[in-house]
Image (spheres, rainbow, N blue to C red):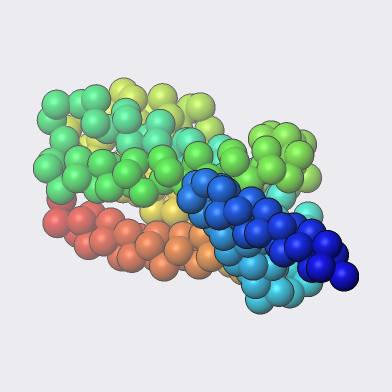
């Protein structure tokens, strides 16, 4: 009986020593692992049956068409702005507008390209209808050849028409699109370009 008690006492002491022998780092690691696991489980529980990534990427044909059409439309706006900015005799307010257009539409071009890549859609596609407001090469050449006030007026007239086409396309996306981010961009385009249309009409009366 005494032998068994002694053996039990020795075994208990060995367990205590073994626990004490564990390094502080190992104990901290275990605690950290447990805390991290609990945190991860809590985050997963709060997220619920998540489809956030899928939801953000959700799109339909209207979204794809919007991106495919607005992309070259924006690119042409940059071309038009660069033509004007390359001239030395353009009124300052018109030059400022051209810079403003480039600053706004450059990042939108990158976003449109990113969406099309994410949606596995080509950046260009056959269009069943002509994009409103797009200039022909002949019209671009007319802008290139113009100078001074004539160039400024022509730029404003062409850009007003160009903006009106973009607003029409954006309104179609708002009505028919599914992707929340694309719809938000469309709303921004409608708001900002309507304001620029009003601004350009005022500029025309002053030239």
The answer to whether residue 116 of the structure is visible from this angle is yes
Task: Locate residue 147, reporting x and y percent.
Answer: 21, 29
Task: Locate residue 131, reporting x and y percent.
Answer: 62, 47
Q: Is residue 134 above or below residue 7?
A: above
Residue found 27% across the figure and 28% down from its top: 146
Residue found 16% across the figure and 35% down from its top: 90
Residue found 69% across the figure and 34% down from its top: 124
Q: Quadrant of residue 98?
A: top left
Closer-to-camera residue (166/129)? 166
Task: Locate residue 193, reporting x and y percent.
Answer: 40, 60
Closer-to-camera residue (70/147)? 70
What is the total number of numbered labels drawn onto the structure image? 0
Q: Quadrant of residue 114?
A: top right
- The reply, left or right, for residue 122 in relation to residue 138 is right
- The reply, left or right, for residue 61 in relation to residue 156 is right
Residue found 13% across the figure and 30% down from its top: 89
Q: Is residue 56 above or below residue 98?
A: below
Q: Residue furthest right?
A: 1
């Amino acid at each position: 009986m005494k032998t068994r008690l002694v053996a039990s006492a020795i075994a208990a002491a060995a367990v205590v020593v073994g626990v004490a022998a564990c390094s502080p780092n190992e104990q901290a690691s275990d605690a950290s692992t447990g805390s991290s696991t609990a945190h991860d489980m809590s985050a997963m529980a709060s997220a619920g049956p998540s489809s956030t990534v899928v939801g953000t990427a959700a799109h339909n044909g209207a979204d794809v068409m919007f991106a495919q059409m607005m992309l070259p439309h924006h690119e042409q706006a940059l071309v038009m702005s660069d033509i004007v900015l390359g001239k030395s005799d353009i009124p300052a307010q018109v030059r400022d507008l051209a810079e403003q257009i480039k600053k706004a539409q450059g990042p939108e071009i990158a976003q449109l390209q990113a969406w099309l890549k994410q949606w596995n859609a080509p950046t260009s596609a056959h269009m069943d209808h002509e994009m409103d407001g797009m200039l022909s090469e002949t019209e671009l050449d007319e802008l290139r050849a113009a100078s001074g006030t004539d160039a400024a007026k022509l730029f404003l007239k062409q850009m007003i028409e160009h903006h009106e086409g973009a607003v029409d396309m954006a309104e179609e996306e708002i009505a028919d699109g599914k992707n929340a981010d694309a719809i938000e961009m469309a709303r921004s385009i409608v708001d900002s370009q309507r304001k620029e249309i009003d601004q350009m009409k005022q500029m025309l009366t002053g030239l």
